[in-house]
Image (tube, coloured by chain):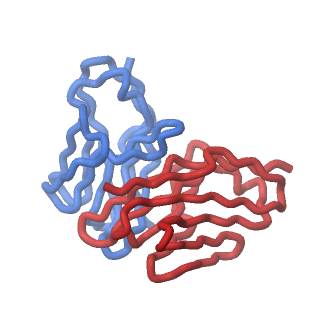
Amino acid sequence: DVKVTQSSRYLVKRTGEKVFLECVQDMDHENMFWYRQDPGLGLRLIYFSYDVKMKEKGDIPEGYSVSREKKERFSLILESASTNQTSMYLCASSSPGQAEAFFGQGTRLTVV
Amino acid sequence: GENVEQHPSTLSVQEGDSAVIKCTYSDSASNYFPWYKQELGKRPQLIIDIRSNVGEKKDQRIAVTLNKTAKHFSLHITETQPEDSAVYFCAASKTGTASKLTFGTGTRLQVTL
């Protein structure tokens, strides 16, 4: 059974703080993704990585960066958190051959 | 890049009726079309998917149809039950290295008794 685990379910941070969201998968998947979920907007891709140390911008990368030092771990970094980054963040992983994405349980981030 | 549109945004049906959700995509190179179900407070989970070499796929009460020419695909749920109430997302991607899913905006399905 694939497991994608995000480090926190809920986070409250102050404006201007540097925020780290961590994601770990245990299925040796090459691809990992960070999505942001907002009501009425669906799941929007922030960044993805298809290999260690490789990253590509998604549709809404502004204000975010990522790190993938190990195959199983993909981190999302908010360099200076702002209130418009209050959202649900979902991590996912997949293998290129199968394409199905497996999601983590989500992190609800509130920036005050 | 790929753009996926999904309709309707909300759908209310009576238990036992059918529900249909429709999506269109823009990139003719997309070849993989999954549907995810997200129950309240839970993570999205794959319920059915279809690849571009197939026109229709069925799994018990759920079916998906794909029209490559028109670039649209649909989810059909028959004999709906209260546990079908959830948000449903369609998505599209090209398989292979660096494949990424582009999602629709979601449909909130409410099955009433």
Question: Where residue A96 appears, x then y in whole percent?
Answer: 30, 71
Q: Residue at x 44, y 46 (%)?
A: A43
Q: Is residue A111 above or below residue B97?
A: above
Q: Is residue B21 above or below residue B66?
A: above
Question: Where residue A10 appears, x then y in whole percent?
Answer: 44, 33
The quarter of the rendered structure image containing the N terminus of chain A is: bottom left
Q: How many discs appear?
A: 0
Q: Colour of chain A?
A: blue
Q: Is residue B63 above or below residue B102?
A: below
Q: Colour of chain B?
A: red
Q: Residue at x 46, y 76 (%)?
A: B51
Question: Where residue B36 appears, x then y in whole percent?
Answer: 53, 59
Residues B21 and B113: in front is B21
Q: Residue at x 37, y 68 (%)?
A: B28
Question: Where residue B103 appears, x then y in whole percent?
Answer: 44, 53
Residue B60 appears in the picture as rendered: yes
The image quadrant of residue B100 is: bottom left
Q: Is residue A67 above or below residue A63?
A: below
Relative side of A1 to B66, left or right: left
Residue B87 appears in the picture as rendered: no
Q: Residue furthest bottom?
A: B53
The image quadrant of residue B58 is: bottom right
The quarter of the rendered structure image containing the C terminus of chain A is: top left
Q: Residue at x 42, y 62 (%)?
A: B92
Relative side of B31 to A72, left or right: right
